[in-house]
Image (tube, rainbow, N blue to C red):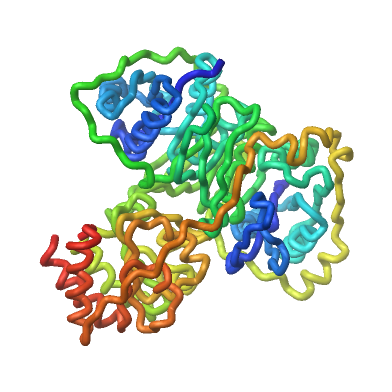
Amino acid sequence: MAQGVWTIAEQRDGEIRKISYELVSEGRRLADALGQELTVVLLGSNIKDKAAAFGPYGANKVMVADDSRLEPYTTDAYVSVISQLVKANEPAVLLLGASVQGKDLAGRLAARLDVAMAQDCTVFAIEGGTLVATRPIYAGKAYAKVTFENSWPQMATARPKVMSVNEPDPSKSAEVMDAAFTLDDADLKTKVMDVVKDESGKVDLTEADKIVSGGRGMKGPENYYILEALADVIGASVGASRSAVDAGWRPHSDQVGQTGKVVSPNLYVACGISGAIQHLAGMSTSKVIVAINKDADAPIFQKADYGVVGDLFDVVPALTEEAKKYV
Amino acid sequence: MNIIVCLKQVPDTETQIKIGSDRQSIVTDDIKWVMNPYDEYGVEEALRLKEKHGGEVTVVGLGPKRVTESIRTALAMGADKGILISDGALDGSDSLAHAKAIAAAIKDLQYDLIFTGQRGVDDDLGIVGATLAEALNIPQLSLIVKVEVAEDGKSVKVQRPIEGETLVITSTLPALITAQKGLNEPRYASLPGIMKAKKKPLAEKSLADLGLNSADFGAGARKMKILELTPPPAREAGKIVPGETPQEKAAQLAKLLHDEAKVL
């Protein structure tokens, strides 16, 4: 009988990523609801000294797979190792992060294990001993509550920045154990040749605490410095609507919406964005939404916690100055 | 080089989604069905690779008869032939089952590369590509924005943006690539293209044609059960920030974000 909750940690260059703590915190809550243990699985090269990070957040055990071929991440190597560990230990619940890496890994892992996988979930619960996951579909225009049938482990990914992180308790520690696995070089068909760092130095939109976003109302790429200035003061990343991206004003990677990134920052400031349904779909899980638009009838005001009816070219620079008082 | 592109038909992204009275599905009246936007990038990339390296592009769709329109669109853009997997027994199947049916249709074809969209903009699961790659036992390269096939046609180099970085990855062929926005700008079908498309081969296959058992498909075989669909949590319109001038409004807003919302 499958037993226990597992979360797959995500690290890059030996640094544990924040999503890993979100997962272990949520994993703890689910493990408590099931009355079972929580195990974190950590993969990487020379990574064992990082295993102690998870006990204070609620992990009972940390299973470490240490191998030079597990750094950097490749789908082939990770799926091979984790599928072996899952088959040998039979956890009841398997959670990953819906980061770029996590989504890639979870998809292939689910296929290897031949189980269903609920992607990019925003709420988890245990009902009658079974995992129930809520996930936005149609980019958030509807929500689906799903569960699993004849599908073990019950597998899901959590949307980054949605699950709250437990207050770490330094008095708690987890048992660290070495994972038993084999890795065949013949199975490793992909290779990371190079890693190009983004020059902007800005936090990726999916991980940003604050986002300042501009749409058609920006009138042209030359005006985004207004948003950059506000973003610099409040520590935000800059996003864009589809129309701004399609017009070539901003790169594709900046697009928020149904065919772009789905974001959940604490603060989302929409400037000159009318609020087309495909845009709202991508940012409606933001905690606080501000809209700045000169059209008082713009649909974005129906979703905004705070609306400013006014010309963004006046309001945003003034807000940048005012914000300096608080940061 | 031979390339297969998988495509799905989805509601246009401007569609307002309404939930059906069964709370299990959406209301499909008045929906404008389009080719999944991410699949369009796959079609375009396949055509560009064909133009450079030669070979044939086959489009594989799954779903009801209306999916033929999207396959014809891809043929009009320049793809060579189409396959529609259509069977009443597929109704209510989950993505795992869809991927297995597509794998059955592809496994005996000659291919060097397979493209799928990184996800369907309907159920947003993004697992068909991975499941298909697993079923065919080939590597997957997800969320790709640049594809370069080696001159000898034996390997591929791709760019994959992750949070804050872009990875340059090489893979042996055959491989499966899931297309991300930024990969290319899909072409429009030309009028001659549309005329030609009408004469291009489009085969329809049932589950039996693919040697599959209908009992493994449909709602009864789902591993992911939908308990309920709901509208998104309501977001109440908030307050309009008062003030006579932009400066006053900005000052009020900053104060509210600090004192009340506590995000500044």
- The percent position of residue B88, horizontal first and vertical second, equals 84, 47
- The percent position of residue A169, horizontal first and vertical second, equals 21, 28
Judged left or right of residue B166, residue B264 is left
User: From where the camera sits, is residue B21 visible?
Assistant: yes
The answer to whether residue A163 is above or below residue A285 is above
Residue at 62% over, 39% down: B175
Judged left or right of residue A173, residue A157 is right
Of residues B169 and A137, the one drawn nearer to the viewer in this rendering: A137
The answer to whether residue A139 is above or below residue A118 is below
Q: Quadrant of residue B32?
A: bottom right
Residue lying at the far left in this picture: please name it: A325
- The percent position of residue A262, horizontal first and vertical second, equals 45, 55
Judged left or right of residue B168, residue A236 is left
Of residues B78 and A215, the one drawn nearer to the viewer in this rendering: A215
Q: Quadrant of the C terminus of chain B?
A: bottom left
Of residues A98 and B89, the one drawn nearer to the viewer in this rendering: B89
Residue at 42% over, 28% down: A33
Residue at 88% over, 40% down: B209
